[in-house]
Image (tube, rainbow, N blue to C red):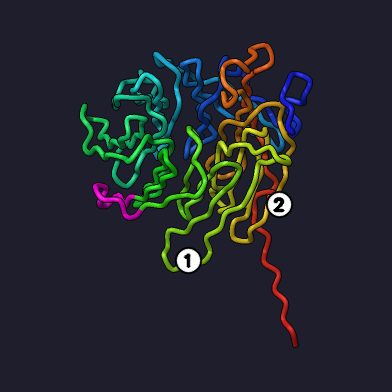
Amino acid sequence: MVTFGAAANTNPNKSFEVAPSPSDSISSLSFSPRADVLVATSWDNQVRCWEISRSGTSLSSAPKASISHDQPVLCSAWKDDGTTVFSGGCDKQAKMWPLLSGGQPVTVAVHDAPIVDMAWIPGMNLLVTGSWDKTLKYWDTRQQTPVHTQQLPDKCYSLSVKHPLLVVGTADRNLIVYNLQNPQAPSFALLFLYRVQENRVTAEVPDEVGSIEGRVGVHHLDGSQQDKNFTFKCHRDGNDIYSVNALNFHPVHGTFATAGSDGAFHFWDKDNKQRLKVMSRCSQPITCSSFNHDGSIYAYASCYDWSKGAENHNPATAKSSIFLHLPEESEVKAKPKVTTSRK
């Protein structure tokens, strides 16, 4: 059993800690696609930004700016040119923050319930937002009304975009794939055998990967590769099963990282079906994570994830921290397959 508490090691992997830390649990981390600029959203209603600098194996962070929402912020996304940050949350609004120009944030999207995930679609210059109001909405940020509203079968929990595909994870174990060239009609839908956790990442493109109760499922979108689909168990300790809170593909090597409520993060090679690196467990759950644009920095947030309710939240020990890990190549690069031939 994993034991969380003040006596446990808060930073067992000796990662660099970003300062100052948010004052409440961290809901999302996202790096700029063009530079080592990190954005974090949190339950204290804040969106914070740091500039990360690296010299060899040393890292430093400098607070750059911050903005506020009226209620907890749940998600964030960057525009593909790295100039603009989007954020959304419990105030049912998405804000556009022209970070590079120093402009003020403006509201560009509205839902009838909290916005839980979002993504910028470069090929269409649109922002897509997913909400507990059971809709996806596509926004031209120059207009006040969405260009398209897509009804979902249940609450949106997460979404992922790699043009022209968009994958949405909803309640009741649904994963829905949309072709953005015809977003009104789903290309197909998948039903996982395991319950998708609320507020958990459930999909990445390419090669759809769903994170579910202590499991990750790899499902190829190419119909000719269906025989390569598989699931595997992870983030478990004996009979204790922990949710997989975050899943990120390495931008160069195509391997991926998972992070969970057991306080651990691991790197995986899906093609060879093996774990590349086992990392030590932090003293608190890891709620979210992100690779930087070239995969040389892996950011992860260690904080209370509310899975055990408010009654088990102890502000005295539940410090929220953002750590930066410098992956070695052996941790994130797939090992070549060994082939044997018989003469």
Front-most of residues 48 and 75: 75
Whether 179 is drawn above or below 84: the answer is: below
Q: Is residue 66 left or right of residue 334?
A: left
Amino acid residing under circle 1? Gln
Quarter of the image with the C terminus in it: bottom right
Q: Point out the tag, 1 or 2, that comes first from the N-terminus.
A: 1
Where residue 128 appears, as percent x and y from the top left, is 33, 37
Which quadrant holds residue 333? bottom right
Query: Which residue sits at x=32%, y=55%?
Result: 187
Whether 191 is drawn above or below 228: the answer is: above
Amino acid residing under circle 2? Ser
Please give the residue where the numbered disc 1 appears in the rendered image.
225
Residue 156 painted magenta: no
Q: CA distance from mark 1 to mark 2?
A: 27 Å
Q: Secondary structure at mark 2?
A: helix
Where residue 4 appears, as percent x and y from the top left, is 71, 25
Front-most of residues 64 and 216: 216
Q: Secondary structure at mark 1?
A: helix
Whether 27 is drawn above or below 273: the answer is: above
Point out the stretch of residues depicted in magenta. 178-188
